[in-house]
Amino acid sequence: MTIQQNVSLKSFNTFGLDVKAARFAEINSLASLQACIKSGIKPILILGGGSNMLLTGDQQSLVVKNNLTGINVIKSFRNKVWVEAGGGENWHQFVGWAVQNGLGGVENLSLIPGTVGASPIQNIGAYGVELKDVFVRLKAVSLETGKTKTFRRHDCRFGYRDSVFKQEERGKWCITSVVFSLTRHQHRLNTSYGDIQKTLESNGVEKPGIADISRAVIQIRSSKLPDPAKIGNCGSFFKNPETSPAILQAILATHPQAPHYPLQNGQVKIPAGWLIEQCGWKGKRVGNTGCYEKQALVLVNYGGATGQEVKNLAYAIIESVHQKFGIELEPEVNLL
Ligand code: FAD
Ligand code: EPU
């Protein structure tokens, strides 16, 4: 393991922002992670696929790129298996491995960029499934002491795009592996969300299996989300906000078509993409950044943007949504 200096992070973040890391190391083993911690350089920033971070400037920390790999079945039950995957495994490739091996549970999470190790950080979710639905436990190394700790589901306090690792444990751990519970037969297929059923029908699939669902999700996502290899982005920039029924009623009075979903806690969720589009941002370009033409929730770098420009755009959007609807959008992306 070598610690390099002044390394460009442009190819390590999906916004394609050209910032530098004062110190940078890639880890392929637990020993090299321990060596980084023992170097005493602080703070340490763990980098996965860089697909959920907005780098607003050069990073003074020791940036550690997690390349810990390995996918192993560690327990077999009659209808399920526990699979342990290294934190540096590519998430979509892990999903592909599961689908190819006939293992169900993660097919709705196909094509989400990034790594296995980052998947619990914001409890990734898509098309009616969240990471917590298949999560068993994870191993993490303390960036302070170098000691390993196992976090079980209740320790992680998963919520919508949230976990303990975005709250009080933020920046304190390197997640080195995650154990998932996947089904071997009698998969619990989830086809009710969004356009999945419609896409399966147009693909001529009557009795879908996990591979059909994975394919449908890939098709839907590819049709509306920009490919970071072509246009820099981090997926949804904001979370979908929870709001009160009173605010919803006020919005419905002037916008009767406003989409909204009731939540179990009595609040309602209103898609941030709709709020942003209503404020006139969809497809709008500001300098080298903008709001994606097919999905208003996605901010993009058309090339040459700085993190600060993207941040300015994000705050202008927050301000205008607040003024028009009285709702405060919260970034989903980690601002660094
Ligand atoms: P990074 O961006 O590298 O890191 C994110 C944060 O986690 C940082 O704070 C980092 O320090 C920390 N971190 C990373 N790895 C570790 C680790 N091993 N241990 C401790 N801390 C760590 N997300 C969804 O939930 N659903 C979606 O449908 C979705 N769609 C997307 C579509 C596109 C086109 C893009 C670009 C992004 C999308 N995302 C989505 C967001 C993103 O893919 C996920 O948040 C993903 O889990 C980030 O993984 P990463 O490895 O790139 O994390
Ligand atoms: N909408 C608009 N205009 C837009 C975009 C969306 O009006 O430009 C409205 C429409 O009513 C649409 C609704 O918003 O029906 C929902 O849109 P979409 O199905 O595209 O999903 P989303 O709520 O924008 C969420 C996640 C995505 C996830 C998809 C599918 C968040 C913040 N985003 O997006 O996750 O892939 O659902 O489950 O929860 C991510 O987290 O990075 C991400 C991409």
Image: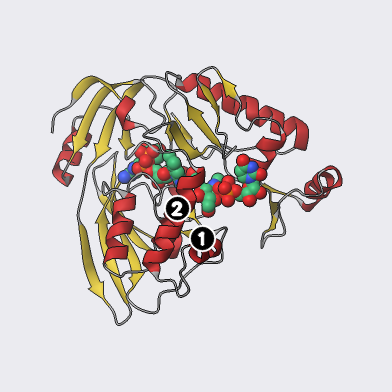
Q: Which residue is found at the position 19% from the left and 54% from the top?
A: 70
* Element carrying mark 2: helix
Q: Which residue is found at the position 40% from the left and 48% from the top?
A: 112
Which residue is the extreme one toward the bottom?
78
Q: Residue 16: where, in percent of width, then height? A: 38, 27
Badge 2 vs badge 1, beta-carbon distance below 8 Å: yes
Identify which residue, 321 or 256, lies in the foreground.
256
Mark drawn on residue 199: 1
Judge whether residue 172 can be spotted in this image.
no
Residue matched to label 2:
219
Judge whether residue 151 can be spotted in this image.
yes
Q: Quadrant of the N terminus?
A: top left
The kind of residue on which mark 1 rests is: Thr
Q: Residue 308: where, in percent of width, then height? A: 49, 20
Cα separation, mark 2 vs mark 1, equals 8 Å
Q: Which residue is found at the position 15% from the left and 45% from the top?
A: 29
**Label 2: few (<14), some (14–19) or many (≥20) C-alpha neighbours in 10 Å:** some
Q: Which residue is found at the position 29% from the left and 52% from the top?
A: 93
